[in-house]
Amino acid sequence: MKKFAILLALPLIAVACGGSDTPTVDTAAIQAGKAIFNSMGCVACHGETGMGDGAAAAALNPKPRQYSDATWQDSVTDEQIKKVILEGGAANGLSPLMPPNPGLKDKADDLDKVVTYIRSLKK
Ligand code: HEC
């Protein structure tokens, strides 16, 4: 019964938060970040939901980690995430199969949105 009550309350909480003037999550930035993530091809390896299961990931070893992993999320700073995206895996002690994206260097705004999207996937 208790579980049932919680299940009932969840959508109500979601609605209440959605109607707030000061959202704690920037859904626009998340959506924009996801669009960039998809258009830049990150999705091919990292997958539609950042689970490291994109079409190209089958051939990867190690596979991209699951962005949902809270332990990983808490272990890296936004700056570290940006560094890997800009410089690639090899320059940061990770797999060289994570490509560098120097084109984002002059697009700090886009880079921020991609990070916001990655952060939004934390479970
Ligand atoms: C060709 C496949 C491929 C593509 C395309 C790719 N990645 Fe990756 N990425 C990887 C792999 C593999 C790793 C894991 C490296 C490791 O753990 O050694 C990784 C790791 C990462 C990490 C670091 C996670 C950690 O372990 O700290 C971030 C952040 C990331 N990728 C973001 C991106 C973004 C953003 C894009 C698009 C601009 C992108 N990746 C494109 C394969 C890819």
Image (cartoon, helix red, strand yellow):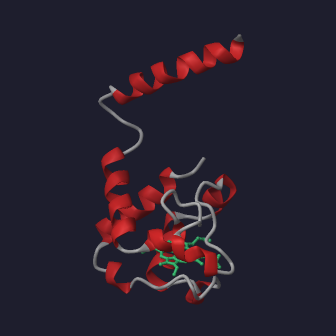
Looking at the image, which residue is at 34% across and 66% down? 36
Residue at the far top in the pictured view: 1
Quarter of the figure with the N terminus: top right
Rendering quadrant holding ligand 1: bottom right
**Is 79 situated above or below 97?**
above
Looking at the image, which residue is at 41% across and 27% down? 17
Quarter of the view holding residue 75: bottom right
Q: Position of residue 92 (x, y in %)?
A: 59, 84
Quarter of the view holding residue 20: top left
Q: Position of residue 111 (x, y in %)?
A: 37, 69
Q: Position of residue 121 (x, y in %)?
A: 52, 52
**Is 23 situated above or below 20?**
below
Quarter of the view holding residue 34: bottom left
**Is 37 situated above or below 49?**
below
Q: How many marks?
A: 0
Left or right relative to 62: residue 67: left
Left or right relative to 110: residue 93: right
Query: Which residue is nearer to you in this view: 35 or 93?
Result: 35
Left or right relative to 7: residue 39: left
Looking at the image, which residue is at 65% across and 15% down? 4
Left or right relative to 29: residue 2: right
Q: Position of residue 101 (x, y in %)?
A: 40, 82
Looking at the image, which residue is at 46% across and 19% down? 12
